[in-house]
Image (cartoon, helix red, strand yellow):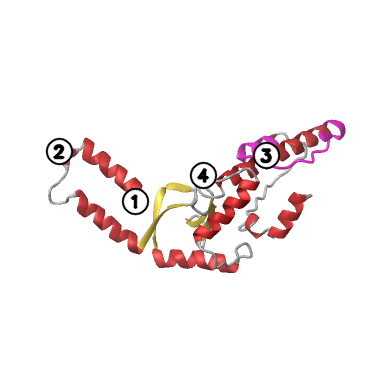
Amino acid sequence: MEIVDIRIKHYETNYKDTIKTSHPISRIKRKIKELYKTFVLVPADKAANNIVVVCRKYYIEVLRNEIHSSNTFQATNLTEQQIAHEHLNVTTNLKAAPDNTKVPTMYWLPKLHKTPYKSRFISASSKCTTTNLSILLTSALTHIKTLIVNFCNKCYENSSINYFWSVKNSLDVLDKLKSAQVPFSTIDSYDFSALYTTLPHALIKRKFSI
Protein backbone atom coordinates (compact mmCIF):
# COMPACT_ATOMS: atom_id res chain seq x y z
CA MET A 1 0.00 0.00 0.00
CA GLU A 2 2.95 2.34 0.55
CA ILE A 3 3.88 1.95 -3.12
CA VAL A 4 0.30 2.70 -4.11
CA ASP A 5 0.32 5.86 -1.96
CA ILE A 6 3.59 7.02 -3.54
CA ARG A 7 2.30 6.57 -7.06
CA ILE A 8 -1.00 8.26 -6.30
CA LYS A 9 0.89 11.19 -4.77
CA HIS A 10 3.01 11.41 -7.92
CA TYR A 11 -0.15 11.38 -10.04
CA GLU A 12 -1.80 14.10 -7.96
CA THR A 13 1.31 16.29 -8.14
CA ASN A 14 2.13 15.96 -11.82
CA TYR A 15 -1.26 15.30 -13.43
CA LYS A 16 -3.61 17.33 -11.28
CA ASP A 17 -5.61 18.68 -14.21
CA THR A 18 -6.38 15.21 -15.61
CA ILE A 19 -8.00 13.78 -12.45
CA LYS A 20 -11.67 13.04 -13.03
CA THR A 21 -13.98 14.44 -10.38
CA SER A 22 -16.28 11.41 -10.78
CA HIS A 23 -13.46 9.13 -9.64
CA PRO A 24 -11.73 10.83 -6.69
CA ILE A 25 -8.43 9.42 -5.47
CA SER A 26 -9.91 8.63 -2.06
CA ARG A 27 -12.48 6.32 -3.67
CA ILE A 28 -9.78 4.53 -5.69
CA LYS A 29 -7.69 4.00 -2.56
CA ARG A 30 -10.71 2.70 -0.69
CA LYS A 31 -11.46 0.18 -3.43
CA ILE A 32 -7.87 -1.01 -3.47
CA LYS A 33 -7.95 -1.52 0.30
CA GLU A 34 -11.19 -3.50 -0.04
CA LEU A 35 -9.51 -5.67 -2.67
CA TYR A 36 -6.56 -6.15 -0.31
CA LYS A 37 -8.84 -7.62 2.37
CA THR A 38 -9.75 -10.55 0.13
CA PHE A 39 -6.75 -11.01 -2.15
CA VAL A 40 -2.95 -10.93 -2.00
CA LEU A 41 -1.02 -9.34 -4.86
CA VAL A 42 2.36 -11.02 -5.40
CA PRO A 43 4.93 -11.04 -8.22
CA ALA A 44 5.20 -14.27 -10.17
CA ASP A 45 8.38 -16.21 -9.51
CA LYS A 46 10.99 -15.53 -12.22
CA ALA A 47 8.63 -12.98 -13.79
CA ALA A 48 8.76 -10.00 -11.44
CA ASN A 49 6.79 -7.69 -13.75
CA ASN A 50 3.80 -10.04 -13.72
CA ILE A 51 1.47 -9.66 -10.74
CA VAL A 52 -0.58 -12.63 -9.55
CA VAL A 53 -3.84 -12.17 -7.63
CA VAL A 54 -4.13 -14.88 -4.96
CA CYS A 55 -7.03 -15.56 -2.60
CA ARG A 56 -5.90 -14.39 0.85
CA LYS A 57 -7.36 -17.47 2.59
CA TYR A 58 -5.56 -19.81 0.19
CA TYR A 59 -2.32 -17.86 0.55
CA ILE A 60 -2.40 -18.28 4.34
CA GLU A 61 -3.29 -21.97 4.05
CA VAL A 62 -0.27 -22.63 1.82
CA LEU A 63 2.00 -20.89 4.34
CA ARG A 64 0.47 -22.80 7.24
CA ASN A 65 0.86 -26.16 5.48
CA GLU A 66 4.49 -25.45 4.68
CA ILE A 67 5.28 -24.54 8.29
CA HIS A 68 3.48 -27.58 9.74
CA SER A 69 5.03 -30.04 7.27
CA SER A 70 8.62 -28.83 7.74
CA ASN A 71 11.06 -29.80 10.49
CA THR A 72 12.68 -26.39 10.18
CA PHE A 73 10.01 -24.59 12.21
CA GLN A 74 8.94 -25.13 15.79
CA ALA A 75 5.80 -23.94 17.56
CA THR A 76 6.25 -21.42 20.38
CA ASN A 77 4.09 -19.60 22.91
CA LEU A 78 6.37 -16.56 22.91
CA THR A 79 5.05 -13.25 21.67
CA GLU A 80 6.74 -11.30 18.91
CA GLN A 81 8.20 -8.90 21.50
CA GLN A 82 9.65 -11.81 23.50
CA ILE A 83 11.19 -13.36 20.40
CA ALA A 84 12.68 -10.01 19.42
CA HIS A 85 14.15 -9.62 22.93
CA GLU A 86 15.70 -13.09 22.71
CA HIS A 87 17.16 -12.26 19.30
CA LEU A 88 18.59 -9.06 20.75
CA ASN A 89 20.42 -10.96 23.50
CA VAL A 90 21.89 -13.54 21.12
CA THR A 91 22.90 -11.16 18.35
CA THR A 92 24.43 -8.69 20.81
CA ASN A 93 26.71 -11.45 22.10
CA LEU A 94 27.70 -12.20 18.49
CA LYS A 95 28.40 -8.49 17.85
CA ALA A 96 25.53 -8.28 15.39
CA ALA A 97 22.94 -6.36 17.39
CA PRO A 98 19.83 -5.57 15.32
CA ASP A 99 18.70 -2.12 14.24
CA ASN A 100 15.08 -3.25 14.07
CA THR A 101 12.76 -4.99 16.54
CA LYS A 102 10.64 -6.71 13.89
CA VAL A 103 11.03 -10.50 13.68
CA PRO A 104 11.73 -12.21 10.32
CA THR A 105 8.71 -12.92 8.14
CA MET A 106 7.88 -15.62 5.64
CA TYR A 107 6.05 -15.42 2.33
CA TRP A 108 5.75 -17.35 -0.92
CA LEU A 109 5.63 -16.64 -4.64
CA PRO A 110 3.63 -18.60 -7.23
CA LYS A 111 5.84 -20.63 -9.60
CA LEU A 112 3.62 -20.40 -12.65
CA HIS A 113 6.29 -21.90 -14.93
CA LYS A 114 5.81 -25.26 -13.16
CA THR A 115 3.17 -27.87 -14.07
CA PRO A 116 1.29 -28.11 -11.80
CA TYR A 117 1.86 -24.75 -10.15
CA LYS A 118 4.19 -24.75 -7.14
CA SER A 119 5.28 -22.27 -4.48
CA ARG A 120 8.64 -20.72 -3.69
CA PHE A 121 8.90 -20.01 0.03
CA ILE A 122 11.12 -17.19 1.25
CA SER A 123 12.16 -16.39 4.81
CA ALA A 124 12.81 -12.66 4.75
CA SER A 125 15.68 -11.27 6.83
CA SER A 126 15.52 -7.69 5.60
CA LYS A 127 15.03 -4.95 8.19
CA CYS A 128 14.42 -7.32 11.09
CA THR A 129 16.11 -8.67 14.24
CA THR A 130 18.32 -11.09 12.30
CA THR A 131 19.43 -8.79 9.47
CA ASN A 132 22.87 -7.99 10.88
CA LEU A 133 23.34 -11.62 11.87
CA SER A 134 22.59 -12.69 8.29
CA ILE A 135 25.15 -10.19 7.00
CA LEU A 136 27.73 -11.50 9.47
CA LEU A 137 27.04 -15.13 8.51
CA THR A 138 27.20 -14.34 4.79
CA SER A 139 30.55 -12.60 5.28
CA ALA A 140 31.93 -15.59 7.19
CA LEU A 141 30.72 -18.11 4.60
CA THR A 142 32.10 -15.99 1.75
CA HIS A 143 35.51 -15.98 3.43
CA ILE A 144 35.36 -19.76 3.91
CA LYS A 145 34.44 -20.24 0.27
CA THR A 146 37.40 -18.09 -0.80
CA LEU A 147 39.76 -20.30 1.23
CA ILE A 148 38.27 -23.44 -0.33
CA VAL A 149 38.58 -22.02 -3.85
CA ASN A 150 42.24 -21.12 -3.27
CA PHE A 151 42.93 -24.59 -1.87
CA CYS A 152 41.23 -26.31 -4.82
CA ASN A 153 43.08 -24.12 -7.31
CA LYS A 154 46.37 -25.17 -5.72
CA CYS A 155 45.33 -28.82 -5.90
CA TYR A 156 44.50 -28.39 -9.57
CA GLU A 157 47.95 -26.89 -10.25
CA ASN A 158 49.64 -29.85 -8.61
CA SER A 159 47.45 -32.73 -9.79
CA SER A 160 45.27 -31.41 -12.65
CA ILE A 161 42.25 -32.62 -10.68
CA ASN A 162 39.40 -30.19 -10.15
CA TYR A 163 37.96 -30.55 -6.64
CA PHE A 164 35.72 -27.49 -6.81
CA TRP A 165 32.43 -27.66 -8.70
CA SER A 166 30.45 -24.77 -7.27
CA VAL A 167 29.28 -22.08 -9.70
CA LYS A 168 28.03 -18.53 -9.22
CA ASN A 169 25.67 -18.34 -12.16
CA SER A 170 24.88 -19.72 -15.61
CA LEU A 171 27.93 -17.98 -17.13
CA ASP A 172 30.20 -20.15 -15.00
CA VAL A 173 28.41 -23.23 -16.33
CA LEU A 174 28.96 -22.13 -19.93
CA ASP A 175 32.64 -21.45 -19.27
CA LYS A 176 33.12 -24.91 -17.75
CA LEU A 177 31.34 -26.57 -20.68
CA LYS A 178 33.50 -24.71 -23.20
CA SER A 179 36.68 -25.74 -21.39
CA ALA A 180 35.62 -29.37 -20.86
CA GLN A 181 38.22 -31.86 -22.13
CA VAL A 182 35.86 -34.85 -22.22
CA PRO A 183 33.46 -34.99 -25.22
CA PHE A 184 29.75 -35.22 -24.46
CA SER A 185 26.63 -35.51 -26.59
CA THR A 186 23.84 -34.71 -24.14
CA ILE A 187 23.39 -32.55 -21.02
CA ASP A 188 20.95 -33.10 -18.17
CA SER A 189 19.97 -30.55 -15.53
CA TYR A 190 18.28 -31.18 -12.18
CA ASP A 191 16.48 -28.87 -9.80
CA PHE A 192 16.09 -29.24 -6.03
CA SER A 193 12.57 -28.43 -4.87
CA ALA A 194 13.73 -28.33 -1.22
CA LEU A 195 17.38 -28.24 -0.25
CA TYR A 196 18.63 -25.84 2.41
CA THR A 197 15.34 -25.69 4.28
CA THR A 198 15.45 -29.45 4.93
CA LEU A 199 18.90 -29.48 6.54
CA PRO A 200 18.64 -30.45 10.24
CA HIS A 201 19.50 -27.49 12.47
CA ALA A 202 21.43 -29.71 14.91
CA LEU A 203 23.69 -30.88 12.06
CA ILE A 204 24.31 -27.32 10.85
CA LYS A 205 25.23 -26.12 14.35
CA ARG A 206 27.54 -29.11 14.92
CA LYS A 207 29.39 -28.57 11.64
CA PHE A 208 29.84 -24.83 12.31
CA SER A 209 31.22 -25.50 15.78
CA ILE A 210 34.01 -27.78 14.48
Q: Nearer the viewer, residue 74 or 179?
A: 74
The Cα–Cα distance between marks 3 and 2, rounded to whole angstroms, is: 54 Å
28 on left or right of 89: left
* Magenta-colored span: 155-176
120 on left or right of 2: right
- Up the image or down, 74 lies above or below 146; here it is below
Give the mark nearest the N terminus, 4 or 1. 1
Q: Residues within 10 Å of mark 3 (few under 14, many from 20)?
A: few
Q: Which mark is residue 142?
A: 3
Which residue position is annotated with label 2? 17
Q: Residues within 10 Å of mark 2 (few under 14, many from 20)?
A: few
Task: Select label 4 or label 3 by which is in front.
Answer: 4
Q: What amino acid is found at the position of numbered circle 4 in the picture?
A: Asp
Secondary structure state at the residue bearing disc 2: helix
**Spot occupied by residue 85 in the image (x, y as percentages of width and height):** 55, 55
Which residue position is annotated with label 1? 1
Residues at marks 4 and 1 touching, judged by CB atoms closer than 8 Å: no
Task: Select label 3 or label 2 by which is in front.
Answer: 3
**Spot occupied by residue 67 in the image (x, y as percentages of width and height):** 56, 65
Which residue position is annotated with label 4? 99
